């Protein structure tokens, strides 16, 4: 008799466990479906800016309490479109850096000065990304490295 009671109790516990798992799974899937059905938020910068992840519901609750204000668009020399996933289009960094080189022409500019100008415009780009963009511009004959230095200048397209 005690064995039968123990087996029945274990079966009941297992059944409750399955039902609780199924209910939790269904609730999680509903949250995922709700999150997937919302439109992606629009971002404000024009280049690849670092993304920071929040802490799930804690962050969502804090933002839900604040009223949402529309952001003013920043005036830039080049207009860039964002892709559907919220990231800037390919080649945007090179276009922005080319505009900076044009603005500082004919004097040579170091990558640190380019980064400072970008940060003044509210855009954060890493040094490796700046170097990659400069190499892209060099391949297009839009920029040239000054001698053996680490300075770059805009090439006006002639020569």
Image: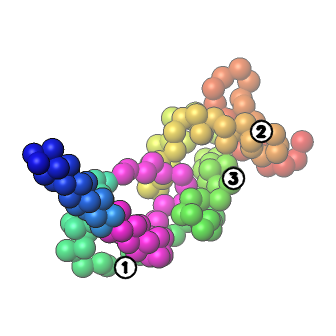
What residue is rendered at 57% in x and 63% in y?
85
Instruction: Please tell me which of labels 1 and 3 falls first in the chain.
Output: 1
Check disc 2 and report its element: helix, strand or loop. helix
Question: Residue 92 lies in what quarter of the image?
Answer: bottom right
Look at mark 1 in the image and give the residue it sits on.
70
Q: Does the magenta stretch include residue 41?
A: yes
Q: Nearer the viewer, residue 79 or 61?
A: 61
Question: CB under 8 Å between callouts 2 and 3?
Answer: no
Label 2 vs label 3, nearer the camera: 3
Q: Which of 141 and 71 is in front in this view?
A: 71
Q: Report crowding for label 2: few under 14, some 14 to 19, many 20 or more residues within 10 A (C-alpha).
A: some
Q: Report crowding for label 1: few under 14, some 14 to 19, many 20 or more residues within 10 A (C-alpha).
A: few
Residue sitting farthest toward the front: 1
Look at mark 3 in the image and give the residue it sits on.
91
Question: CB under 8 Å between callouts 1 and 3?
Answer: no
Please provide percent x and percent y for residue 113: 52, 38
Question: CB under 8 Å between callouts 1 and 2?
Answer: no
Look at mark 2 in the image and give the residue it sits on.
138
Please provide percent x and percent y for residue 14: 25, 54
Label 1 vs label 2, nearer the camera: 1
Colouring rule applied to residues: rainbow
Q: What stretch is highlighted in magenta?
A: 25-53
């Amino acid at each position: 008799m005690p064995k039968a009671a123990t087996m029945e109790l274990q079966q009941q516990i297992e059944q409750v466990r399955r039902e609780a798992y199924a209910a939790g799974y269904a609730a999680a899937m509903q949250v995922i479906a709700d999150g997937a059905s919302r439109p992606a938020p629009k971002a404000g910068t024009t280049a690849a800016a670092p993304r920071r992840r929040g802490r799930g519901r804690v962050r969502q609750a804090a933002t839900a309490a604040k009223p949402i204000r529309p952001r003013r668009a920043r005036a830039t020399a080049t207009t860039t479109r964002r892709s559907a996933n919220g990231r800037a289009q390919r080649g945007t960094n090179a276009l922005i850096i080319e505009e900076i080189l044009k603005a500082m022409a004919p004097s040579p500019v170091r990558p640190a000065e380019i980064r400072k100008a970008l940060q003044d415009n509210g855009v954060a780009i890493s040094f490796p990304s700046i170097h990659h963009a400069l190499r892209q511009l060099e391949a297009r004959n839009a920029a040239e490295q000054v001698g053996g230095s680490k300075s770059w200048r805009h090439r006006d397209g002639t020569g």
